[in-house]
Image (cartoon, helix red, strand yellow):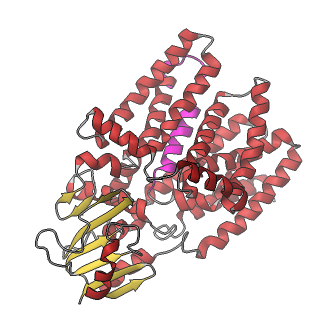
Amino acid sequence: MTPIFTRVSIIIFFVVASTWHISASPATWFDEGINLGIASSLIRHGVYSLELGPNSFVPSIERSFLITTNYPTLIPVAASLYFLQSFDPGLGMARVPMVLYLWLFGFFLFRIIKRLSDNPWTPWLALALLATFAPLYGNGKAVLGEIPGLVFLCAGILTLPQSLNHKRLFGAGLLFGLSIAAKPYFLIVAPAVLVSELFFYWSHKKIFFSRIGIMTLGAVIPLFLWLMTIIQPFHWITILGAINYYANSYAVQSLWDSVGVNLLRFVSESTPIHFMLLFIPTIIVWIRRYQHKTITATEIILAVFILITFGWYLKTPGWYRYFFTAHVLLLALFPLSLSKIFSRKTAAIISVGLFAIQLVHVVSRTRDPLYNSDAATVFTTEMKQKKVPSGDVLVINSPSIAFLLRNQPEVRIHQILQINPDLHFGYASLKMLYDGGWYPYVITSGSLADTDLEQNYDVLEKEYEPIVVVEKYQLFKKR
């Protein structure tokens, strides 16, 4: 096996895996459906919000609670839907920009590892590990904000100069601002960059403040656009409301219970254990390099970002997606960290061993409904074939279905979305708001438990009958 053959094989595998069965891999789910609905509303109605019913949208004052993946993701998706919808008006064309973001992420992260390593094979091992990491596709191919945010973070790191280069500092600030605009979670980029600047430039305060000032000027532009899209009206009350929501968007009631349960996951569940096995050698290397004052600005930014992500995850409900951004960065850094602890040969053997394990895992997941399911598309196709429904239909917690039905003029879609136990959008009733009658059709994607419609379960059972069922998706018709 020649080196060039190995490198080309890694690239081909990454390209194929990131485009394979694009409309069904991964299965679409709640958050992606909301983002698809916003992008669709933008191109169909010119409204940057989610359509809840005919000519009815989530009001501006509530937009900060709805749009948590913003314009760096949604505008390219809207453009893709607009220009490519003649090929496929469904999920496939909506996900094309996400594939491009995945490729950019792989390229920029490859460049970062190459900058940090003196071994030409280390970045290729990093790319091979990324290419065989199943969650990269589970999160990255869906219309979500994590990979776009990482793309702009990595691009900003690569742009950030050591000197007082005004153009590059401004460009780095612009890219860091776009990272934050992609998803509010990336606000942690700001302290990560600040810690790095303090470490290297605080002893030269004039340079420090100049660098921070120029980067801030660059970041102001995308951040201003971000705030203008979500804070309406622009007032300190709405800003505080948005901050409080982003701090606990999942409405966790007991912080310490969440911390204890989530810590236990890192010794009891496979994905968090995988995370920790990557985390430990990288932490060891960072501590050593910090002690010897050989650590780089790139490493400090990544270290602070990963550490804050880990701490933030502990207070969440425990979904692995909440540490995904740190996980993929640690995975790419793993071969480099091993090479600083062991010999190059040992580091390569361990990395190749992990690559082999991940390769088996990612291939075995091709039939896993989480990573490959066209249930939503099959469900809406079957509905169209049976020519149902026509008229008013209530879609409960299934925004992806609402998106896929958007081009049927005979269907008037009304949506109810339960974001968390304390927040929902739409009129939470099985009765129509304008005349008080029962909806003739209702679509669900699972139980009504833990929603504001839970008390209507008996009504759904007695008054309606299922006429189309595909996996978790059900279309009910009024008896």
Q: Which residue occupies 72% across, 46% down?
A: 279
Q: What is the quadrant of the C terminus in the image?
A: bottom left
The x and y percentages for residue 336 are 76, 42
Viewed as shown, does residue 163 lie left or right of 448?
right
The image quadrant that residue 284 belongs to is: top right
The magenta stretch spans which residues? 144-168
Answer above or below: position of 299 versus 203.
below
Q: Which residue occupies 82% across, 42% down?
A: 339
Reply yes or no: does residue 235 show up in magenta.
Answer: no
Viewed as shown, does residue 287 lie left or right of 478?
right
Viewed as shown, does residue 344 lie left or right of 129?
right
Q: Which residue occupies 79% across, 40% down?
A: 119
Answer above or below: position of 474 versus 307.
below
Can residue 160 be seen here? The reply is no
Residue 92 vs residue 430, the one in the foreground: 430
The x and y percentages for residue 327 are 63, 50
The x and y percentages for residue 325 are 57, 48
Identify the residue at the far left of this view: 435
Residue 6 vs residue 460, the one in the foreground: 460
Principal secondary structure, stretch drawn in magenta: helix
The x and y percentages for residue 137 are 56, 60
Q: Which residue occupies 71% across, 56% down?
A: 274
Can residue 403 be seen here? The reply is yes
The image quadrant that residue 94 belongs to is: bottom left
Q: What is the quadrant of the N terminus in the image?
A: bottom right
Reply yes or no: does residue 151 show up in magenta.
Answer: yes
Q: How many marks?
A: 0
